[in-house]
Amino acid sequence: MTRESGDASLTEAVASGHLGELPGRLAELVRYALKLTSAPATVTAHDVNALRGAGLDDRAIVDLNQVVSYFNYVNRVADGLGVELEETWPTELRASRRYLLKGHERLPLVARSSFPTLDLAQAREMDRLMIEELGVPLERMMENAGRAITVVARARLGGSVANRQIAVYAGRGGNGGGGLVAARHLANGGARVRVVTAGPSERLAPTTRSQWEIARAMGIPCAVGATPAARADLVIDALHGYALRGNPRPETAQLIRALAGDAVVSVDVPSGLEVASGALVEPHVRADATVALAAPKRGTFVPASRDAVGDVYVADISVPGLVFERLEERILPDVFDRGGVVRLERDDSP
């Protein structure tokens, strides 16, 4: 695509799904093509109307649909019969690229309105109610979060993590603990996992340090701080949770910068998204996907942070409806009927 169009940024936008820097009309064309390719059953009249809003008439929309559909057909024929690129193609164009296989996602898709968006005070109260009044310990919620992160990681990597290079960047608190639980499950699935923490283990919160010790006992490589390493197929960003205020600490900021360019799944919120204000601080993670724990947090759907959040998933970490009632919020009672992790529609109205 770069060779034919002369525009490497267009190629990167298509491959990564980050469309924010493309002109509006082109962004809508690419967004429709990506959706028709990777999740055709989710295309609705809203997507067609967005193309009309970008200036395409119905003939142009049909042409776009036919081109995308035809290329998908040809690719499926080639993949199904093992057709390889001609030997005359340059070697660098024949090399496998480490981009996400979104077309293989099979997680239930639900409307954004299925969940409330929690602010900082509500997120803290939710944890307090779970631990102090319902008696659900933090360790149990970490375990639930880690399993959900593993589900999303597997989906983002095409259904399998075997032999994939996965890095878990873990912070001091509860998010770091959830990431470390995911490291264990991913390793059990055959992934080549490494853990990176922002500081030494003695500075981790007790529950998080316990998870770190288990990961280390399993033989998962654990390092402190950013170190030169091969790029990962996927990075789990578990550096900061909802409690971040202001810019990250220097050692955490170093890790955030180190993971730039990798495919990233963030735990609860991308590190650098300040839930208290809904703003992005510097530096911040630009995630391909975010796994919200129990419910999305403030700032998740703010237009300015949309490209930093990526696709949004919500994980059932065992928070019941009565907790949301205490927060004066509600979730649909059967929203997790088809599984403990759901994917939210991105094009829902704000």
Image (spheres, rainbow, N blue to C red):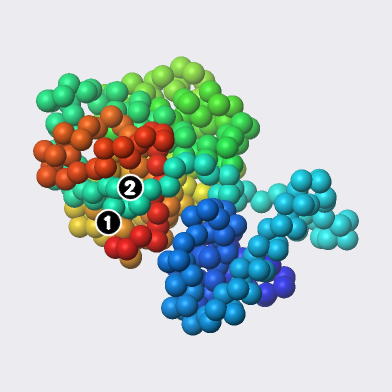
Which residue is painted at 37% across and 34% down in the image? 337
Q: In which quarter of the image is the N terminus?
A: bottom right
Which residue is painted at 16% across and 24% down in the image? 134
Say which amino acid is labelled 1: Gly
Residue 160 position by quadrant: top right
Q: Earlier in the sequence, mark 2 or mark 1?
A: 2
Q: Callout 1: helix, strand or loop?
A: loop
Give the camera-side residue of 175 and 199: 175
Residue 217's place in the image compared with 68, above or below, is above
Say left or right for 313 vs 116. right
Q: Which mark is residue 269?
A: 2
Residue 94 x %, y %: 77, 54
For marks 2 and 1, give the CA distance.
9 Å
The residue pinned by badge 1 equals: 299
Residue 31 x %, y %: 51, 65
| One can see residue 176 in this view | no
Residue 182 position by quadrant: top left
Labels 2 and 1 touching (C-beta < 8 A): yes
Q: Which mark is residue 221?
A: none
Give the camera-side residue of 38 and 292: 38
